[in-house]
């Protein structure tokens, strides 16, 4: 077919575009509300089938970024491309993506079936096709048999599944999820996380998932974008984010981090002046005797408190030359420490994380 | 159905059981007295008067009679009833179409402006009805403001008869009743979460589709309440019709008013009033049933 067209000379091939464009590309997005910059030069590329999480505390712009991608907000500058097409100025109903809203936003005057079938009915699919695909979507979220239920009769978890089915039924290329599990209890959330990830893998749809829950981000994502102050402070796989955080903010927001004070750094002989270092609690061994060896950092400390945390015992201690902020390490449950004990905190040099003082403006 | 019966039982048991010590009743008692003295008792009087009869020499004899009701159902009055219902219906429809965009606009305004906008809407109520009617007379009169402007602009050569026409009556009715639909509609529209509208757009609904499929159905309670608030008083209106209407716009309200004032035929007026209330209640009852079955 294509060759025929080429022979007739009707087909022009654009050689500048060698590979398919990425599913989503946002470029230098800036968004201000009043005079504050909610988003400051955010750029990001997402490939087909990727699960990307926007992680950060509230008010750092991650939801705004999502809303700009969905088309609910217009950026002050910057562009949004979907599969290579510039959609920055397109309204939401003309973008090939759907959103799962934080509070589900189910239509209260429709039953479950009509909620899920909404987008299909708008596209004027034949009746039996709508029925088939709606039931498929409900089966996917394990809600078969709930078609005639009213939305008011559903539990939080069920509403969440309906919202998911409603967004998936149209088979969008990209699904945006705005803290979809915020209102669910802990156990249900854990279950839904696994289910959601399975659905995403099964359908091969790209997900952008907004959350402030670092556990959620670490378990589900292919890549995590950590947001802070309207910028993506670090973008990488969960392992990269956790093992090699680039800034103190990322280190402290994802997991727990013990940040070295300047005096500790100098005493340990690490890096140059004012370089920033940190260590994860599980990489610190707390000993009652000085057992320092080469290739380790050894910091004399005083135990402040301990706390039983199930699988481990958390030990809080004040490192010598610290800035007053307590450090935490994980010890075995059988180890006994009491407040006031003099201990040594031992960290292998390769486990010391080197942080940037300040992130560069453009990454 | 079952549920309805249950709630009715609950209501009656609440009425009976709470009579002694429930604080609800203490708090409600002024309202209950109000309803009793200003609604129930006058209503019963009207009903009773409807069954009496004017004696000889126009004196008032307490003679039991159904004559007034038979007279009120005389087909002679049918055109009047149809005309009244038509005006009420037209007024309601026009108010709905004018009021909806207005209510939508207010409901979408930033919260700090909504109060001011609602206040502006209530502005006409700050003046006496008679004063506003007289100002309409000044605007619409033969040598009034509107004719003056149109003639000055040389759009017309001779003044147009605005006053005492169906046009002026409708204008007056719409003017008076518009706020009654805007207020409940605004409340209804405000209650629709913005995320529902966003979800509809997100799922592919264009603005018009979104309005038909989401906004309108969810605003129905407000639309219904507003339409009722207009339709019922418009059916009984006589003041607007008397001043802004003409001989061709004699309404049911005027007929009733005349029985009580000009012709001093209270029994007939009372019968007309009773029938009007009965029709309205029946209509409301049926509409309510339909509405309940829909949901």
Image (cartoon, rainbow, N blue to C red):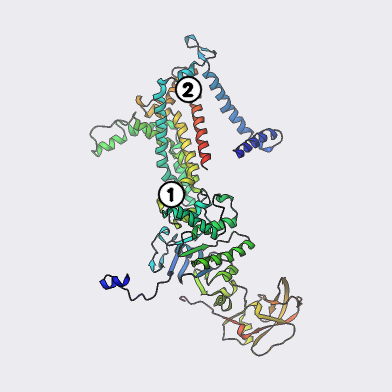
Which residue carries the number 1 mark?
B211
Q: Residue at x 51, y 33 (%)?
A: B286
Q: Is residue B78 above or below residue A52?
A: above
Residue extending furthest bottom?
A294
Q: Residue at x 41, y 51 (%)?
A: B209
Q: How many marks?
A: 2
Q: Residue at x 50, y 21 (%)?
A: B270
Quadrant occupied by the N terminus of chain A? bottom left
Q: Nearer the viewer, residue B107 or B82?
A: B82
Q: Is residue B219 above or below residue A91?
A: above
Which element type, helix, strand or loop, lies under badge 2? helix
Is the residue at mark 2 from the same chain as the one at mark 1? yes
- The percent coordinates of residue A353 (x first, y second) are 59, 81
**Which of marks 1 and 2 precedes in the sequence?**
1
The chain to which mark 1 is attached is B
- The percent coordinates of residue A281 (x first, y second) are 65, 77
Which residue carries the number 2 mark?
B272
Q: Which mark is residue A28?
A: none
The chain to which mark 2 is attached is B
């Amino acid at each position: 077919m294509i060759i025929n067209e080429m022979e007739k000379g009707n087909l022009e091939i654009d050689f500048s575009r060698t590979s398919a464009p990425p599913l989503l590309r946002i470029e230098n997005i800036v968004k201000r509300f009043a005079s504050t910059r909610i988003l400051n030069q955010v750029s990001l590329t997402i490939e087909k089938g990727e699960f990307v999480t926007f992680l950060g505390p509230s008010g750092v712009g991650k939801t705004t970024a999502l809303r700009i991608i969905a088309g609910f907000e217009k950026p002050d500058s910057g562009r949004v491309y979907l599969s290579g097409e510039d959609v920055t100025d397109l309204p939401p109903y003309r973008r090939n993506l759907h959103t799962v809203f934080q509070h589900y936003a189910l239509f209260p005057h429709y039953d479950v079936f009509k909620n899920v079938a909404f987008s299909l009915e708008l596209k004027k699919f034949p009746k039996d096709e709508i029925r088939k695909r709606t039931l498929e979507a409900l089966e996917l979220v394990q809600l078969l048999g709930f078609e005639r239920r009213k939305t008011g009769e559903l539990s939080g978890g069920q509403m969440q599944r309906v919202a998911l089915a409603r967004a998936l039924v149209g088979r969008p290329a990209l699904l945006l999820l705005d803290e979809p599990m915020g209102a669910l209890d802990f156990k249900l959330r854990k279950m839904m996380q696994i289910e959601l990830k399975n659905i995403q893998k099964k359908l091969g749809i790209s997900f952008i998932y907004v959350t402030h829950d670092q556990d959620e981000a670490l378990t589900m994502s292919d890549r995590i974008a950590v947001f802070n102050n309207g910028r993506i402070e670090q973008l990488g796989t969960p392992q990269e984010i956790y093992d090699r955080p680039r800034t103190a903010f990322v280190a402290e927001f994802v997991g727990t981090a013990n940040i070295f004070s300047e005096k500790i750094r100098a005493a340990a002989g690490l890096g140059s002046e004012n370089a920033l270092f940190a260590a994860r609690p599980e990489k610190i061994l707390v000993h009652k005797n000085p057992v320092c060896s080469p290739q380790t950092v050894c910091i004399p400390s005083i135990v402040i408190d301990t706390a039983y945390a199930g699988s481990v015992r958390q030990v809080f201690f004040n490192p010598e030359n610290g800035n007053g902020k307590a450090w935490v390490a994980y010890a075995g449950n059988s180890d006994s420490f009491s407040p006031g004990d003099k201990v040594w905190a031992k960290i292998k040099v390769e486990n010391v994380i080197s942080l940037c003082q300040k992130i560069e403006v453009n990454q | 159905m079952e549920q309805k019966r249950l709630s009715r039982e609950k209501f009656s048991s609440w009425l009976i059981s709470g009579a002694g010590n429930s604080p609800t009743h203490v708090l409600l008692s002024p309202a209950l007295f109000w309803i009793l003295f200003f609604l129930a008792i006058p209503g019963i009087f009207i009903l009773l008067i409807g069954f009496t009869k004017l004696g000889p020499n126009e004196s008032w004899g307490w003679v039991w009679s159904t004559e007034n009701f038979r007279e009120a159902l005389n087909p002679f009055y049918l055109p009047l009833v149809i005309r009244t219902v038509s005006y009420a219906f037209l007024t309601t429809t026009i108010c709905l179409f004018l009021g909806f965009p207005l209510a939508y606009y207010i409901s979408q305004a930033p919260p700090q402006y909504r109060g001011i906008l609602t206040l502006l809407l209530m502005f006409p109520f700050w003046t006496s009805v008679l004063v506003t009617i007289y100002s309409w007379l000044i605007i619409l009169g033969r040598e009034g403001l509107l004719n003056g402007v149109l003639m000055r602009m040389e759009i017309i050569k001779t003044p147009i008869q605005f006053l005492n026409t169906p046009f002026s009556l409708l204008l007056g009715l719409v003017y008076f009743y518009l706020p009654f639909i805007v207020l409940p509609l605004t409340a209804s529209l405000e209650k629709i979460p913005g995320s529902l509208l966003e979800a509809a757009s997100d799922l592919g609904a264009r603005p018009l589709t979104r309005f038909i499929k989401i906004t309108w159905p969810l605003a129905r309670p407000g639309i219904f309440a507003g339409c009722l608030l207009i339709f019922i008083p418009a059916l009984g209106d006589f003041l607007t019709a008397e001043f802004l209407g003409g001989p061709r716009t004699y309404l049911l309200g005027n007929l009733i008013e005349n029985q009580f004032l000009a012709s001093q035929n209270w029994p007939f007026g009372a019968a007309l009033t009773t029938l009007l209330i009965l029709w309205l209640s029946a209509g409301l009852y049926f509409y309510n049933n339909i509405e309940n079955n829909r949901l």
